[in-house]
Image (cartoon, rainbow, N blue to C red):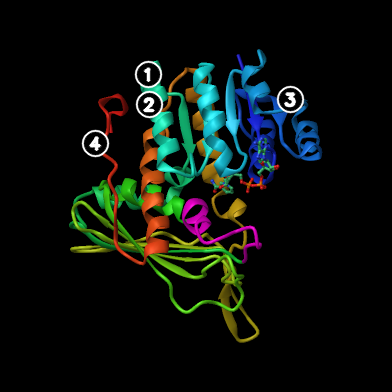
Amino acid sequence: MELRIGVIGTGAIGTEHIERIANKLSGAKVTVVTDVDKPRAEKAAAVCGARIEKDGTGVIASSDVDAVMVTNWGPAHAKSILGSIAAGKMVFCEKPMTTTGADAKKIVDAEIAKGKKFTQVGFMRRYDKGYLQMKEILSSGKTGKPLMIHCAHRNVAKGTEYNTPMSVNDTAIHEIDVLHWLVGDQYVSAQVLFPKQTSLTHKDLRDPQIMILTTESGILIEIEVFVNCQFGYDIKCEVVCERASVELPLASFPSVKQDAKYYTALETDWKYRFIDSYDVEIQDWINNASKGIVKGPSAWDGYLAAVTADALVKAQGSGKIESIATGPCPDFYSC
Ligand code: NAI
């Protein structure tokens, strides 16, 4: 039987996921949608033949919804996830799971109280072929121990609604999740440096930024976040180890030689850079949610990311090195 999904938030990624469920993936259909912007909900409903509910609470309570997909704005995620857990429904939530560690803790506590995992977080880089290949190489024992990680997360441009804390909660949150998973370590401290500012930003956004994280074993991680770089959507990750350096492959485009030039294209949009990993991620969620289990990034992963993000946002304001204290992983999550 097909998993009947209710979608809360039919903006950019909500519509992308609805289209992939309708046209590419198997085992599920979207039956109900909602958005505070009604015309958006109507447009998305037309793609998949869903009906429209007036709000997220209505979606979660619907008898024709088995599982919930939360793709609205970050600050609204916690309410829909907690509502889904209370209703006993499996839930997929786009990143960030929550925009504060305190809200993330409420979700972890709610799952433990119910004795069941319900939440998968949209950290799709764990499904990306390039990162999976890196993890395999790093786990082989041949590279020696990881010592340093150099990353960049560059977007072409952001609008004036995007501000300094969003560089952490909306952008670097991907690196925060994928890097500790990649090297099997936990973060202990966070710091943010502000280089010379681009003239192409606005008053509420410091751009670019260098975020520095250290791990329990002493790995030093440096993430450049530059969201108005103008030239492309550019994701870089290099793990420098004792005996090797392991680097994320670039998105694959042909090399072109023409007019005395030798060049390759760059991606400009997140939708296409990780398109395959979104497909694998959502299919995996459908398969597991249909059985009532979570195998992908869990509420605990969402919590670790939220606590780390809290420390980075604090460091943006203080200019100091801030500590990251997540506490031990509960047995319930078997980390
Ligand atoms: P968007 O602004 O295009 O869409 C958000 C939608 O949610 C809007 O249509 C808005 O009207 C609606 N909305 C806001 N509050 C609501 C509420 N309480 N109930 C119902 N609808 C509500 O934003 P976008 O880019 O689609 O991002 C949505 C989420 O997905 C964000 O958390 C973002 O960080 C995440 N995201 C994840 C990506 C990834 O690579 N995994 C890529 C892009 C976004």
Residue 114: horizontal and vertical position, in percent?
40, 16
Could you say whether the residue bearing mark 2 is in a helix, strand or loop?
A: helix
Quarter of the rendered structure image containing ligand 1: top right
With respect to residue 161, does 296 lie above or below? above
Number of marks present in the image shown: 4
Report, in whole angstroms, how far the alpha carbon at label 4 lies from the one at label 3. 40 Å
Closer to the chain start, of discs 1 and 4, is 1
Task: Specify the amino acid type for callout 2.
Answer: Asp
Queried on whether the Cβ of the residue with tag 2 lies below 8 angstroms from ligand 1, the answer reads: no
Q: Magenta region: which residues?
A: 157-171
Residue at x-position 66% and y-position 13%: 63
Badge 1 marks a residue whose secondary structure is helix
Q: Which of the numbered marks, if any, corresponds to residue 328?
A: 4
Q: First in sequence: mark 2 or mark 4?
A: 2
The x and y percentages for residue 133 are: 37, 50
Amino acid type shown at disc 4: Pro
Instruction: Work out how far the residue at label 2 is from the one at label 4, CA to CA, in angstroms.
Output: 14 Å
Which numbered disc covers residue 291?
A: none
Q: Can you tell which quarter of the image residue 265 is in?
A: bottom right
Q: Residue at label 2?
A: 109
Cβ–Cβ under 8 Å for marks 1 and 2: yes
> Which residue is denoted by mark 3 in the rendering?
53
Badge 1 residue CB within 8 Å of ligand 1:
no
For disc 4, the neighbor class at 10 Å (few under 14, some 14 to 19, many from 20) is few
Say the numbered circle drawn on residue 113.
Answer: 1
70 is within the stretch colored magenta: no
